Structure formats: structure tokens, C-alpha cells
């Protein structure tokens, strides 16, 4: 265990006061709003991290009055107030609801008028954060409807920002089309393409770890690294998101966004400075270097699986095909493991095994950098040939830590080695400052800071890589193999070089 030296100062917590604003959540009664956004906003509010003056407006097709919406929000906050229910009722007083009809453009103008009245009553200046927590198929329509309504006419010096959830499009063409629609109404600096993985503390720490220390970077390349595993395993299934997941599958749900961002952070070159455009540019270069998977040999590089019935924590759970909203003969993968290569100087020949799956035995988001074995074993006579190579593990969830495994001598008269691990975990004062990923992205949007959001070019580069793969695996005339794995197991895995399986050891 390591000592934390040099405590974080107050400036590490917040970056100054935020502009007063209205936060308008489209899809306000949906899963994302109630499970993630409202709780994140409440936590920020309870920690005095929101602007002094603000309001939250939930919007959606469901007809609800303010009171019923507040009740829904209160349910979403159950368990969060920790004895301070006063804070909850103060927060609920700032929440409102207005229904909109996506087939009725005039309803967006009525929303705008209703909002202006509210803002005026509360003395708000008209800064607006529009959050599309909507089914992805509605993004373009919602952008047209909001963009052409009075909602998007800012008052003098006011700002309008738009947050769009992933997946951004369902392939390269649709991502381009969506972007074109957004740009008819919004400028690039108004568009925040969210990826909540980027806002996770441990994910942000990857850049600090790599580029604020001089000892790791010289080893971070093909000379020393044998392979890299990037895994996001989840024990949950698809829950009540069957109809969304049938359209997405694991490649659109996790790979096109979260997994690609983890890959970029691990593989990118150091930017000249920690500025949004430079950091995003270096990530885009990683996506540019992705070697296309030869489709005629796709099975050598991609394993797909779908969970069947099984046990999670000892309790039976249904298989994917038995989930609501899923076709009984669905071939949508809930698991994928991909072997990737980057065609650039640093990473030539180093495999990246990228894996994500649902209904695995446990939640585990982890990046492992497996170093090469020592070039020559001077201990051959006493130990035999093999000495375990070093491994650096970055745990993102559920644990948040970095560990380095190396060899040490077992105390005693004989020469025997054993692997020891040095850990850094977020503990002590730092732990209290940990922001949930959604809290962080909401703050960044209010600050207009796009560092942790996707740039369209990155989105397109990743789709350019994944679209041929998706076309191949979704081609009904030549189905790719899809292994059904029992819920509660690790999925088909990669036996190539026997390396990726080491991830779970
Ligand atoms: C979301 C996916 O973006 O990320 C979900 O749509 C997935 O399917 C979730 O469960 C995982 O996020 P986290 O933060 O729990 O690892």
C-alpha cells in the first residue's frame, strides 16, 4: 500500500462559480433521467456544487403535472438523503415538468414560453442546458424541434448547450447524418457528445498517471509491452432496455464509445498541452491507426457471445432471449472480445484484447498492461526458465486502483521468487472528493468544457472501423458464430496466444 503525499487543495474540488442556468432533460421520465441524472444533480446540489440559481425541467411525452414529477424524482432519490430530508425537499422545489409532443412542433414553442416564464420568476438569465436523455432514434427529430423553436434563442450573452447521449448514430452514415442535422441548429462548441466513462476518476487518472510521471512512459511501447487487455465485464443483464439493446448489441452499446475511449487513453501520444483540442487530436490519431480487421478472417479477431440462463450470485437469471423486448431467436451479441492492432510506431505488433460482456460473474472494468518477460534469466539454474512478467493493472470499477505486480525473493535461505503487488487506491481525503461520472459531466457542460466529450471526427473514425464489422456480423446471408454462454460465466474468451484469459486471474 502506498502513502498519499501532498493532499489535494480546495482548487481540486471545483473550478469556480457556475453560471445560473436551466437544465432541461428531454426523456425526463426515462431510465437515464431517473437512475442517473436526477440523483447526480441532487448530489451536486447537496454538495453546493450547482450554480446558486438554477432550475431543472423534465420534459417528455408522458402527461404529468409538476407534483407527480416531483414524486417520481423523490423516488429516484430514495436512499440518498442520509437523514437530511430537508435538502431533498429544497431540491424538489427546483424541479418542474412540461410535456412535449414530438409530432407537434408547436409544443416545443409552448415549452419555451413556459420555461421563459419560469426563468423570469426565478430571475434566471436564460442559459440553457438541453439534455437528450432520449432513445437514440429520436435525436435528429429532437434536434430539429428544439433547434427551430424558441427554446434555442438565447438572451443576450446567454448560452445554449446540447448534450447528446451515446450511441451517436448506428453506423458511419447515420452518425454523419445526425451530425449534419445537429449543425443546422447548433455550433460545434454547443454540442456535448457524452461518454460517461471519460468522466470516471480512474479513467481521467490514466493521462495523469502516464504523463505526469516520467518512469512509466519509456516502457509504454512495443519494446516492453507484450499485450494489453481492456475489459468491461458486467454482472447485470440488459434489464428493461430490451428494445434498445436489440438495436444496439454490445458493439454499439460499449465498443463504439467506452471501449474505444479507454483504448485511446492507454495508447495515445502525449499531447503538447492539456488542452481540449490537443487531447482530442491525439485520441483521434489512435483511432486513425486502428488496423481494419480482415473480414474474411473475422473469427480469428472477434468472438461474439450471448448470455443464456444461468446464475448470478447464486440466483437464477433469464437468458437474453427470455428478456422482455427481445426476439426469442435474437442473434444480438451481449459479449464481444476483439483482438486489435494499431498501425503506428509505438504499438506495431502489440495486441490489444478488448472485451465487454453482460451477465459475467462480476462487475469488473480493468485495463491490464502485460509487460514482456525478462530477456534473459540469470536465475535459470535455480528457477527454471520461466519468470512471471510484470503487470500493471488499472482498475476502474468496482475497485478504483492501480497495481503493479513484480517479482520478489521469498525470505529464507533458498532463491525462490514470488509475485508481489504494489497498490494505489483512492483513499483518504481524495475519496471524499470523488465525483460520480454523471456529476462530473454535468459540471463540465455547465462550464462549457468539452475535454471529456467526443469530437465528431473521433466518432466517425470509430464508426469507420466498426461499421464493416457490424455489416459483416449482421449480414443474415452469412451468420457469424455466436456462442451462448451461461449467465454468471466469463463468456467465450480468446484463446489466441492464451493471453486474454489471464485477465480474470
Ligand atoms: C452504458 C451502457 O453506456 O454503460 C450500459 O449503455 C452499461 O449497457 C453501462 O451497462 C456501463 O456503465 P458503468 O459506468 O456501470 O460501467
Image (cartoon, grey):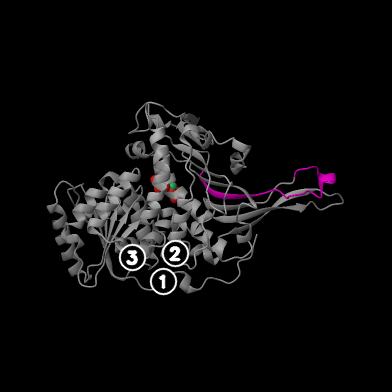
Which residue is under mark 3?
446
* Quarter of the figure that contains the N terminus: bottom right
Q: CA distance from mark 1 to mark 2?
A: 21 Å
Residue at screen point 19% across, 60% down? 151
Q: Residues within 10 Å of mark 2 (few under 14, many from 20)?
A: some
Q: State the SS at label 3.
A: helix
Instruction: Please tell me whether mark 2 sits on a helix, a strand or a loop.
Output: helix
Q: Earlier in the sequence, mark 3 or mark 2?
A: 2
At 43% across and 57% down in the image, what residue appears? 437
Q: Residues within 10 Å of mark 1 (few under 14, many from 20)?
A: few
Q: Position of residue 133 (x, y in %)?
A: 30, 51
Q: Is residue 67 left or right of residue 201?
A: left
Where does the image place residue 326, in percent across and percent down from the top left? 35, 32
- Image quarter where the C terminus lies is top right
Q: Which residues are magenta?
A: 363-386
Q: Residue at 41%, 62% (x, y): give it.
A: 451
Judge whether 444 appears above or below 294 on screen.
below
Furthest residue toward right? 413
Q: Earlier in the sequence, mark 1 or mark 3?
A: 1
Q: Which residue is label 2 attached to?
A: 278
> Do callouts 1 and 2 mark residues in contact (Cβ within 8 Å)?
no
Q: Is residue 412 magenta?
A: no
Q: Is residue 481 above or below residue 56?
A: above
- N-terminal of the pair, mark 1 or mark 2, is 1
Amino acid at each position: 500500500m502506498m502513502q498519499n503525499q501532498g493532499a489535494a487543495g480546495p482548487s481540486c474540488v471545483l473550478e469556480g462559480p457556475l453560471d445560473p442556468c436551466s437544465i432541461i432533460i428531454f426523456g425526463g421520465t426515462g431510465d437515464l433521467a431517473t437512475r442517473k441524472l436526477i440523483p447526480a444533480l441532487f448530489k451536486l446540489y447537496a454538495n453546493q456544487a450547482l450554480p446558486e440559481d438554477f432550475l431543472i425541467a423534465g420534459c417528455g411525452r408522458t402527461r404529468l403535472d409538476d407534483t407527480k414529477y416531483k414524486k417520481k424524482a423523490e423516488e429516484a432519490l430514495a436512499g440518498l438523503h442520509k437523514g437530511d430530508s430537508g435538502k431533498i425537499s429544497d431540491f424538489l422545489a427546483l424541479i418542474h415538468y412540461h410535456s412535449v409532443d414530438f409530432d407537434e412542433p408547436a409544443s416545443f414553442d409552448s415549452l419555451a414560453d413556459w420555461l421563459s416564464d419560469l426563468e423570469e420568476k426565478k430571475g434566471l438569465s436564460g442559459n440553457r442546458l438541453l439534455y437528450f436523455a432520449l432513445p437514440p432514434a429520436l435525436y435528429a427529430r429532437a434536434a430539429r424541434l428544439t433547434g427551430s423553436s424558441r427554446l434555442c434563442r438565447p438572451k443576450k450573452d446567454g448560452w445554449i448547450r446540447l448534450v447528446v447521449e451515446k450511441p451517436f448514430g448506428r453506423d458511419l452514415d447515420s452518425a454523419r447524418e445526425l451530425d449534419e442535422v445537429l449543425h443546422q441548429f447548433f455550433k460545434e462548441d454547443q454540442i456535448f457528445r457524452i461518454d460517461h466513462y471519460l468522466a470516471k476518476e480512474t479513467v481521467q487518472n490514466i493521462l495523469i498517471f502516464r504523463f505526469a510521471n516520467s518512469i512509466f512512459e519509456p516502457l509504454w511501447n512495443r519494446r516492453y509491452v507484450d499485450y494489453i487487455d481492456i475489459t468491461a465485464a458486467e454482472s447485470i443483464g440488459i434489464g428493461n432496455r430490451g428494445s434498445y439493446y436489440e438495436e444496439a448489441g454490445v458493439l454499439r452499446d460499449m465498443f463504439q464509445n467506452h471501449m474505444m475511449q479507454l483504448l485511446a487513453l492507454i495508447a495515445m501520444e502525449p499531447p503538447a498541452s492539456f488542452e481540449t483540442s490537443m487531447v482530442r487530436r491525439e485520441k483521434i490519431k489512435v483511432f486513425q491507426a486502428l488496423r481494419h480487421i480482415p473480414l474474411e478472417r473475422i473469427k480469428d479477431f472477434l468472438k461474439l457471445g450471448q448470455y443464456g440462463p444461468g446464475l448470478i450470485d447464486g440466483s437464477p437469471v433469464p437468458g437474453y432471449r427470455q428478456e422482455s423486448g427481445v426476439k426469442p431467436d435474437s442473434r444480438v451479441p451481449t459479449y464481444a472480445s476483439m483482438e486489435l492492432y494499431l498501425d503506428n510506431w509505438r504499438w506495431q505488433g502489440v495486441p490489444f484484447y478488448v472485451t465487454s460482456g453482460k451477465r459475467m460473474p462480476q462487475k469488473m472494468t480493468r485495463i491490464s498492461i502485460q509487460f514482456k518477460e525478462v530477456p534473459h534469466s540469470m536465475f535459470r539454474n535455480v528457477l527454471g526458465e520461466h519468470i512471471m512478467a510484470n503487470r500493471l493493472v488499472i482498475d476502474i470499477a468496482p475497485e478504483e486502483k492501480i497495481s503493479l505486480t513484480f517479482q520478489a525473493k521469498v525470505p529464507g535461505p533458498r532463491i525462490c521468487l514470488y509475485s508481489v503487488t504494489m497498490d494505489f487506491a483512492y483513499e483518504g481525503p481524495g475519496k471524499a472528493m470523488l465525483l460520480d461520472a454523471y456529476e462530473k459531466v454535468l459540471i463540465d457542460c455547465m462550464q462549457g468544457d468539452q475535454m471529456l466529450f467526443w469530437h465528431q471526427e473521433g466518432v466517425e473514425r470509430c464508426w469507420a472501423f466498426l461499421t464493416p464489422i457490424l455489416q459483416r456480423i449482421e449480414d443474415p446471408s452469412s451468420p457469424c458464430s455466436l456462442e451462448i454462454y451461461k449467465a454468471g460465466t466469463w463468456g467465450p474468451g480468446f484463446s489466441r496466444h492464451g493471453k486474454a484469459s489471464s485477465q480474470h486471474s
